[in-house]
Amino acid sequence: MTRKQSDDDSPLEELEGQLYARREMPASRRPRLHPDDAREVASDWQHEHPHVTPGLDSMVRRKKGKFVKPFLLFAVIFFVIAVGIAAVVITRGGNTVSSRNVEVSVTGPVQVDAGDILSFTVSVSNENTTALETTDLIVEFAPGTRDPDDTARELPRLRESLGRLNPGAVAKKEMHATAFGKSGDKQEIIVSVEYRIVGSNAVFVKEKAFTYEIGHTPVTLLVDAPSEINAGQEFEMEVSVVSNSTETLKNLLLVAEYPFGFVFGDAAPRPSQGSRVWDLGDLAPGAKKVVRLRATVEGQDEEERTVRFTVGVADANKIDVVTPFLTETHTLALRRPFVEVNITLNGSVADEVAVLSGEPVRVDLSWRNNLPDSVVDVVVVARLSGTVLNKSSVTVDDGFYRSNTNTVTWDRQSDSSLGELPPGATGQLSFTFEPLDLSDRADITSPEIDIVFSLTARRLGDASAPSTIATDLGEKIIRVNSDIALAQRAVHFVGPFTNSGPMPPEAEEDTTYTIIWSISNTSNNVDDVQVSATLPSYVEWMGATDPSGEKISFSPVGGQVIWDVGEVARGIGIGNSPREVAFRVSLTPSISQVGAAPTLVSEVRLSGTDEFTGAPVGASSGAVTTRLTTDPEFEEDQGRVVE
């Protein structure tokens, strides 16, 4: 059974009817090929087919046209919208924020005196259409600027909050600081504004610089020192503090900061704290105070070391500057000499050495060639001068002393090693001498011997450098201590006191004696002189002294007698009377001392300081017994204890 087709059947239904039909279906008609439809087939795969199917080509063109038109339309619409938005932003400004619309201005003096308060105003204006959030003002001051409320505190940087800055708003801040520096110095303050905007975590910054000049300073600080020094060689620095103020500057302090390798030697005046602090006290208008210091600096060739000095008002403990007025620096360039010579006197590298009169002085010179080239024809000269030089005592090793010129010379004739010094070569020279014996000379004052050293040579191998080398090796001073002498004697029958008791002394009986101390001094004043000795337990201090003006005391604990002499002038006891003091003691000998000559006073010692040389001096005298060898009325059999 077949389904009857109707005219309304769709092609699908028609095809279904044919499929299920029980009758034979007629063969379908197929399109016939025409010669025009023949297509040429390529003979190989490497060449592109010369023809495209017309149907396919038209389909591609239809697809391209389908997408191009909407894309062009979309681009035109987007461009129009973008131009519109840009026009609105340009004409109305939108909510954009620009740092060019944040104005920072600083107004203040162009000049301020050191130590005075610098006052300036910072203004920040917001010309944007959007508010600035969490706005901070940051001020970075010039080095050395101080807090006006506490000048001990430096002000390197300050930060203050300005809060929210609305459109068109202006914030102002008054700032104050104490300025310090050298007159004429240009100093700069950097003012920065940091801010944020709503909806962003980014931090924006606007910066402004303000420059001012340091005018008048309360003091002038001058440092006079060489710009180049030899490493390890002593040099001198002079630091001057001069008042520029019309009023007295109170409680001034000078503080030094030394670089690495700086070795402090000595200073005049001496530092009040350690080796770097000087208490200058008050400085009147126009007054000047000078500190001279000697030092050495260790380091390598062509290195630099900078010494810094600061002057200002001292703190309560006078160990640091609480209000600095001025800071000055001095840079030292280190150089190594062509031929380095180290000189010692009796083993000391000091430029000044104190010796006793008549004591031998040994001078040693050790040399080294620091050049990369050889040095030839080396001549070293030591020139001596001074009224206390004993010419006949000069002895030279491998050199020659010429007495008419007082020079010691070493050259290739006296020492063949000086004919040529290869690079890095070393050697040593020496001589000895003695100062005159001043024990009986009161006519010589301030006795000293000066030695000036120099070196000349010729350099080989470097045509660009001078061939002749002339080097001043420096000066050494030998100062001779004064010959201060001390004598102790005991008497019974003579002297300022009337003594009592049996002579010879008897066991368990009291006999009194007078002890006399005498001081003589030659060429230099000696200060802080003190003489001391000890009484044995069986000797009693009687309390009587002469003259009454001398400061002499006795301590029962230990039995020590002390004479506080003070200053002993030069020439005392040389051709005139010595400085003397006498005191009385009492001896009560024991039975065990029968037949002996007991000690009355132990060895006596003197100490003091030579004012010319600065060196300690001393003297001593042996113990005295009941054998009174210095008493003209004493008889030998009166010296031993009897029953």
Image (cartoon, rainbow, N blue to C red):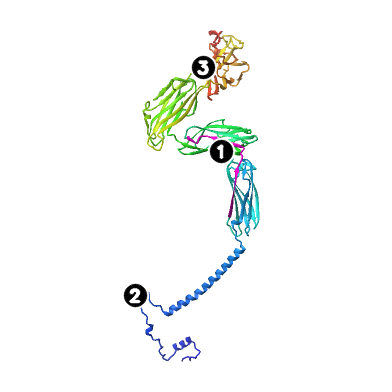
Give the vertical position of 374 relative to 149 (above or below). above
| 2 or 3: tag closer to the N-terminus | 2
Mark 3 residue type: Arg
Mark 1 residue type: Glu
Give the vertical position of 149 relative to 359 (above or below). below
**Quick one: which residue is furthest to the left in this view?**
43
| Residue 183, horizontal then vertical, whole percent | 59, 40
- Tell me if I can see residue 271 in this picture: no
Specify the quadrant of the image occupied by residue 26. bottom left
3D distance between C-alphas at marks 2 and 1: 96 Å
For label 2, the SS is loop
Q: In the rendering, which numbered label is found on residue 44?
A: 2
The residue mark sitting in front, 2 or 1, is 1
Mark 2 residue type: Asp
Give the vertical position of 452 relative to 326 (above or below). above
For label 1, the SS is strand
3D distance between C-alphas at marks 2 and 3: 136 Å
For label 3, the SS is loop
Query: What residue is shown with label 3?
Result: 441
Disc 3 crowd rating (10 Å Cα; few below 14, some 14-19, many 20+) is some
The residue mark sitting in front, 3 or 1, is 1
Query: What residue is shown with label 1?
Result: 328
| Residue 420, horizontal then vertical, whole percent | 37, 31
Find the magenta span and give its range.
Answer: 204-229
| Residue 352, horizontal then vertical, whole percent | 50, 27
Check residue 614 for magenta coloring: no
Q: Locate the C terminus by quadrant.
A: top right
